[in-house]
Image (cartoon, rainbow, N blue to C red):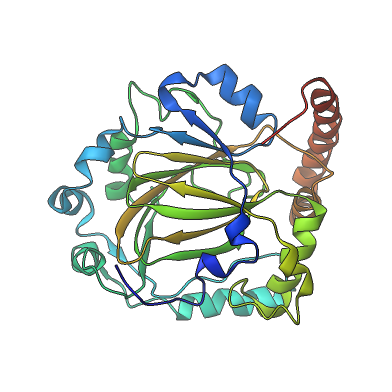
Amino acid sequence: MSDKEYPWDLKRVPNYDSALTVAVEDAEQLDASTFRRRYVLQNRPCLVKGAVAQWPAFQKWADPDYVLSKIGDVKVRASCRPRIEGFGLRSRPQDLIATQTTRDQLLAAEEVRHVLPRLRTPDDDVLFMELRPAEPPVRSFSEDLTVAGARFSFLPSPPPPRFGLYSGWAVMFYKNSYSDWHFHPGTDAMMCQVLGTKDVLLLPPTQLSWDQIVPIHTEQWKVYDVDVGRAPAYREVRPYHVVVEPGDGLFLPVNWWHTVQARPREYGITVPVTWDSPYRDLRQPATRHFLRMLWSQRKLIGAAALAAAAYGTVANQVRQQLDPPSL
């Protein structure tokens, strides 16, 4: 166990010790209808125990020789610092600077076979690499992420992500990693732990959460090591805390804020699976923000998305009156 403290330690988040919990489901007992009705259409997170325990990856990827046989020759630029999140929340010039800063912090490109031994060394160094299925060697991993042709028994055929923001799935290898507060616009996600344990804090997609997080992103460009004197609203955050263990999947509904920290000195592998969310609600500030971005870049697509969101908002209001959500 390491005694090293990182500036992004989740225990520093206000009200961490009194954090709320989310619903927990057993993958073997969770069917597709229940998952959609209780969580997807209610925009409600849940931890699914054993969600990926039957994936071939759960056994195979523990063997570094197997991993290297698949992607050892792939070149990757790993990172040793958390990346800047919150794109689109700042001005365009600021986002361009943030993008360049993130790129400048990447390490020189090298083959995965040279990075993996360092990832597996239990020290205090921060190291992270993300691989997406655009490259054929990485795409070959896909066969390790299904059972009977489906990623999840409770989500057999999710629609692919829209708008080109996400690739559907990726593979993250890490040690001592951290992801700053962010949300997934237009997209639901399942954070799947193949190796290692992660702690996750969540905030609902309300105006209150937006007012607590967004000003810090826009002014400080990071939501850790926060000066609460400059961001007093942050003192009042009331997060949910989830521990995601190997074999588990954490359902992250569209627009829910979350921040993620790996356990110290622990080598891990996470597979985020993303799909187009059927939940659209104009009452959520993240939805309105995303629609403004779409409109500014692709007006026809933005107009269609606005119409879908308006319809979805009415449908959600009716649904929530008939079946009030709870956590």
Q: Which of 260 and 156 is in front in this view?
A: 260
Q: Which residue is drawn at 51% across and 77% down?
A: 7
Q: Which of 197 and 87 is in front in this view?
A: 197
Residue 110 location (% of width, % of height): 26, 71
Residue 244 location (% of width, % of height): 43, 46
Q: Report which quarter residue 318 is drawn in.
A: top right
Vertical side of 63 occupied by 117: above or below: below
Q: Report which quarter residue 81 is drawn in.
A: bottom left
Q: In which quarter of the image is the C terminus?
A: top right
Vertical side of 202 occupied by 153: above or below: above
Vertical side of 65 occupied by 35: above or below: above
Is 28 placed left or right of 181 in the picture?
A: left
Q: Which residue is drawn at 21% across and 39% down?
A: 59
Vertical side of 216 occupied by 53: above or below: above
Q: Which residue lies furthest to the left in this view?
A: 65
Is 115 placed left or right of 98 in the picture?
A: left
Q: Residue at x 27, y 39 (%)?
A: 58
Visible residue check, residue 89: no
Image label count: 0
Residue 32 location (% of width, % of height): 53, 20
